[in-house]
Amino acid sequence: MQLVVDDVRLLDHMSLAKSTSGKIARRKNLEWYVAEFAGQRIMPRYNDESVSNRVAHIVANHTRGQDNIISSGEVDSMALVRLILDLEEAFGVIVPAEAQLALDHFDSVSGISTLIHGLIESSESDLTGVRSISSCESVRDRKCADFLAGPKEYDLLILGSSRVQSVSAKLAETYGYSAYNFSVFSARAEDWYCIYKFVTTHNRLPLKKIILGIDIEAFTVGTGLDERLTSSSYLSAFLDESDQAYASGSEAPPDVKPAQRNRFDQLMRQLRQQAADRERAHGYDSKSGDLVYLDDDPVCRKHNRRQPLQLNDPTDYNLEYQMRLAGFDRLNPKRLSYFLRLVQSCLERGTEVTSFFTPLHPALHQHLCTHTDYMLRMRELVDGLRGNQTPLFTLSDFSTPAQFGGLDEDFINAAHIGAANADLLLHRLLAGTASKAKSA
């Protein structure tokens, strides 16, 4: 077939699926491969030297020299088209129209190499349908607007905080779902509820499943409603009347002392200012809600390629999360009520709720278990949900990678898993339901 083998896997004897006639079932094995191995693939990497050598070899098939390729007149327009096609096929890139017209790019091997290397770098993430988001823009409102402008025909909804944003709705498609990732920053239980109500109000299809990543601090006391929720024209209407009154300023917030809340917010801002390198330019795919990083650094490139990361400082979030959980001596009953109403509504509609405690780096997890009531609050939530456990509602403890077969090092920071871990987590949640979803 004149194809270069891109990935080789050694499998157990008799592990490939076969048809009833005994032939290799190509489609079933492709689906299995995507589910099992796609997130682990090591994509080809090119450095300057390897690009230059390969370009020189390709150019040699079209001209005798390596300089003055165009200006010498040896390569005419038809030969240039053939050269561009060979380059595109060899490197898996598309040479844009403006580059084709800038003939100086193609007058030397060094010029072509620079062009190709730049195209490889920019093609490492698929930015189709991705819009960047500014620091002053609300992710809640952005995703609401994108959702309304999109197909609105989803049967799987991914909910949670930024700790769930690496979970890929596009990957969920390989399991037979049409999914949207509606994770938002600092989401608490009232956010989940309002987003769920927003989606079910506007979506054209009934939801088959909700994947809900739970941060235990989503039930915290001592912090009020997020202004990004209360000020959202899309979501605030789904809040309880008392919370809408609080949002309008006509009532005092429950369980929150203003001075305490203001001090917490102040400390959080100070911490983030000290760790400015955590902020990376990003955007969201308008059709899937998936996160795409826009910066050109190793973390962003690997994340967009769904490759494992290597976290340098597993203690980078210790102070912030210890502060978040300080004084968290009980679950907030109002937030617990929002969560239970979401679950109950799903059960009444026949929607599966597959929930899990979101992963932390093992070092941060151990720190919180030692210095805070992190585990006590998790146990308190589990105990309060025992009466709701049905085949349609499950809660898994994925608070460390080991609990879902993940990689200890694949973290953007100690509180946010990388894409490879997110893909392994999603496989753990959906692999057993793939055939059921497709047959449905």
Image: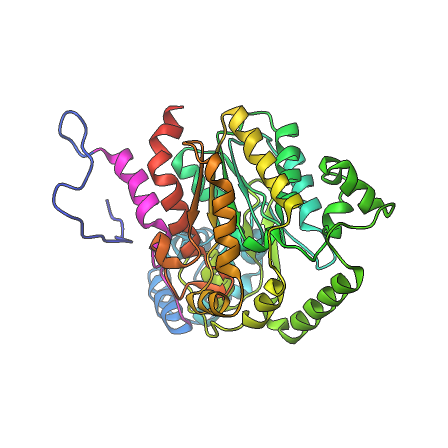
| Residue 22 locus on image (x, y percent) | 13, 29
Find residue 355 and report its horizontal and vertical position in percent: 48, 43
Q: Is residue 253 above or below residue 328?
A: above
Horizontal side, residue 329 vs residue 14: left or right: right
Instruction: Determine if the magenta segment contains residue 200.
Output: no
Q: Residue at x 29, y 41 (%)?
A: 32
Q: Mark yes or no: residue 311 visible.
A: yes
Answer with the quarter of the image where residue 146 lies: top right
Give yes or no for residue 28 being in the magenta stretch. yes
**Residue 168 visible:** no
Above or below, 27 relative to 35 = above
Using residue 24 as the reference point, say whether residue 324 is left or right of it: right
Query: Residue at horizontal 27%, vertical 49%?
Result: 3
Main secondary structure along the magenta-highlighted residues: helix
The front one of 376 and 118 is 376
Q: Is residue 322 left or right of residue 433?
A: right
Q: Quadrant of the N terminus?
A: top left
Residue 217 appears in which quarter of the rendering?
Answer: bottom right
Q: In the image shown, does 150 or 190 lie closer to the viewer?
A: 190
In this rendering, would 186 be left or right of 214?
Answer: right
Is residue 296 positioned above or below 141 on the image?
below
Percent position (x, y) of residue 124?
47, 58
Q: Which residues are magenta?
A: 25-47
Foreground residue, 329 or 390?
Answer: 329
